[in-house]
Image (spheres, grey):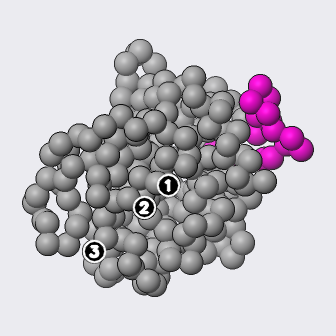
Amino acid sequence: MSSARNPVIPLSYPARATIDDPGYVRRVPAPFDDRPTLRGRHVELVPLDVRYVDELVEAASGDRDTYGFTEVPATRAQMAAYVERFVAQRERREAVPFVQRRVADDRVVGCTRFLELRWWRGRTDPDEVEIGGTWLAADAQRSPVNTEAKLLLLAHAFDTWGVWRVALCTDARNERSRSAIERIGAQFEGIVRNHRLSTVDGETGRPRQTALFSLVVDEWPRVRQRLLDKLG
């Protein structure tokens, strides 16, 4: 159930979406909301909360081969600390974290978030954000869930918040993630050296080199159409 604190922002598909008339955009003239729910056909992004810890542990319990460059806690204690950390970041307006819930079976299948929120123009809503911290259960990877989640996040950033820029970052060694970001249509900007702490096992406390990609507002119509076409 939606509320003023937690509105549901749906994604509905037009018969034929176009660049000039995307069809699914609904602008919500409201103050900055750090707990939106973003809903599509395949996935619903709901605000991260401690009540999802057990479901997230279950989602992370399958094949973990693709998590080498991503922080995905394996135990309940680790997952609880992970969730609490990002909930605290939300309270400080440092992040807007989500649980990814697959619509087909109402199952929690991972996490994603907005981070690095920046304000330049004195507005309530941010002017630049990063999308990151994304992971999915093994059986939800390479599925419409991931494509639609990116569409929902980008639509919220560009069409609801009115940002000028969205960044997407990954460990420079993560070829799978880099390829996925490129398929969205994001532009590669370069390698940021010693950018963040590595999440790779055995590299605790060491800096990582980050592959930096971005989308700017002028590119969004083309990217939006590409994602809609992928989803059919």
| Closer to the camera in the image, 223 or 205 | 223
Secondary structure of residue under mark 3 = helix
Q: Position of residue 125 (x, y in %)?
A: 48, 27
Q: Quadrant of the C terminus?
A: bottom right
Q: Are marks 1 and 2 in contact (CB under 8 Å)?
A: yes
Please say whether residue 10 is one of the residues in the magenta stretch.
yes
Please tell me in which quadrant of the rendered image residue 194 appears: top left
Instruction: Give left or right: position of 177 versus 84.
Output: right
Q: Position of residue 136 (x, y in %)?
A: 49, 68
Most common SS among magenta residues:
loop
| Closer to the camera in the image, 52 or 151 | 151
Q: Which mark is residue 176?
A: 2
What whole-number distance in Å separates the C-alpha atoms at marks 1 and 2? 6 Å
Instruction: Give left or right: position of 199 versus 31.
Output: left
Please tell me in which quadrant of the rendered image residue 116 appears: top left
Eyeballing the image, is 125 above or below 150? above
Instruction: Give left or right: position of 64 versus 150.
Output: left
Q: Amino acid at mark 3?
A: Gln
Q: Is residue 40 visible?
A: yes
How many other residues sit within 10 Å of disc 3, few (<14), some (14-19) or many (≥20)? some
Disc on the earlier residue, 1 or 3: 3
Q: Which residues are magenta?
A: 7-24
- Name the residue rendered at 34%, 59% in the picture: 174
Eyeballing the image, is 220 above or below 181? above
- Name the residue rendered at 79%, 29% in the picture: 21
For disc 3, the marked residue is 78
For disc 1, the marked residue is 180
Q: Are marks 3 and 2 in contact (CB under 8 Å)?
A: no
- Name the residue rendered at 28%, 68% in the picture: 81
